[in-house]
Image (cartoon, rainbow, N blue to C red):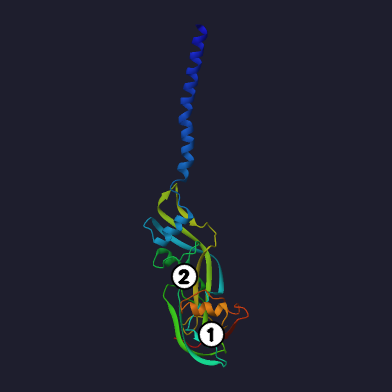
Amino acid sequence: MTRTGRSGTHRSKKKRILLALAPVVALAVAVPLMSNAGAATPDEVSADCNANSDKLENCEFVDVQNKRDSFGPNERVSSVTDNCGITSAATKTFGVSSSVTRIIQLEDGTSAESNTILGNSVASVGFKYNSVDFNITRDDKTTSFSFDMSGTVNPDHIGFFMWSSKRTDVSGFLKATYKEAQDGQKVFFSPSEGGTTVHVFYPQILDSGTPDGRLWLRNVKCGTPQADGIINSDGSSRAEPGFGEGGENITDVEVALPNAS
């Protein structure tokens, strides 16, 4: 009987110990979960800045480095003249037109809206990079050109004009200040403080006020995959190789930019 009594007492003590430990363990688990709850992630900072969220007190673009004379996408900026099957060159007049604007490119490749707190910050940063030697567009106003230009289309080739704008590529990160503290802090960064994966492309402008860049006449040999792809695209835009990068079936001739308006 005495042995039975001692055994019962022992089990009772174990239960009390386990019950006492349970709340402590639960609390230990809850603390790390709570420490991460509500903290703004880089993706959320980027999304809030782009959406001009009312949770924000401010959103700034902080520049870290820059590269002038950075060329933008390669664009076809005229109609395509078809000289396939013809044994003589053809001189044609092309209507050439394009436009440029400032672009705020987030690290996921999307473009941020300009009419936001972030857009105002980007315009302010642009003042640093505007100089006598380099005029840039600091705001989101479109700058364009349009003119007629003659060019020679080679025998059995198609011909058209290509364009790539000159830009000042300024890279850095976003600094967001929230109205309400999250986990004891109000300032968060995207992608991180000191990062360089957010880009702002400020188009460079000539003294005439028109975009600066590279303009060239491209001839593409008929019957090649490159020519067939352009013809079959029915005039729609498509990715094109850069100047001098098209290979043996493509001939590029750079031309000086006229005083366009």
**Residue found farthest to the top:** 1
**Could you tell which of marks 1 and 2 lies nearer the N-terminus?**
2
User: Picture coordinates of residue 59 (x, y %)?
Assistant: 43, 60
The x and y percentages for residue 172 are 52, 63
Asked if marks 1 and 2 touch (Cβ < 8 Å), the reply is: no
Q: Residue lying furthest left in this view?
A: 54
Q: Is residue 134 visible?
A: no
Above or below: residue 256 compared with residue 225 = below
Q: Percent from the top left, x then y, of residue 203?
A: 49, 75
Q: Which residue is mark 2?
A: 103
Three-letter amino acid code at the position of disc 2: Ile
Residue 228 in sight here: yes
Split into 4 quadrants, where in the image is the C terminus?
bottom left
Q: Which mark is residue 37?
A: none
Residue 158's disc is 1
Q: Secondary structure at mark 1?
A: strand
Examine the rendered structure and indicate whether residue 112 appears above or below residue 145.
above
Q: Nearer the viewer, residue 40 or 165?
A: 165
The answer to whether 195 is drawn above or below residue 136 in the figure is above
Marks 1, 2: nearer the viewer: 1
Judge whether 112 appears above or below 27 on screen.
below
Residue 48 appears at what percent x and percent y? 41, 58
Kind of residue indicated by mark 1: Ile
Report helix, strand or loop for mark 2: strand
Q: Residue at 42% across / 50% down in the picture? A: 181
Q: Residue furthest right?
A: 248
Near-viewer residue (181 or 67): 67
For residue 219, which quarter of the picture? bottom right
Looking at this view, is 213 or 61 the one in front?
Answer: 213
Closer to us: 43 or 228: 228
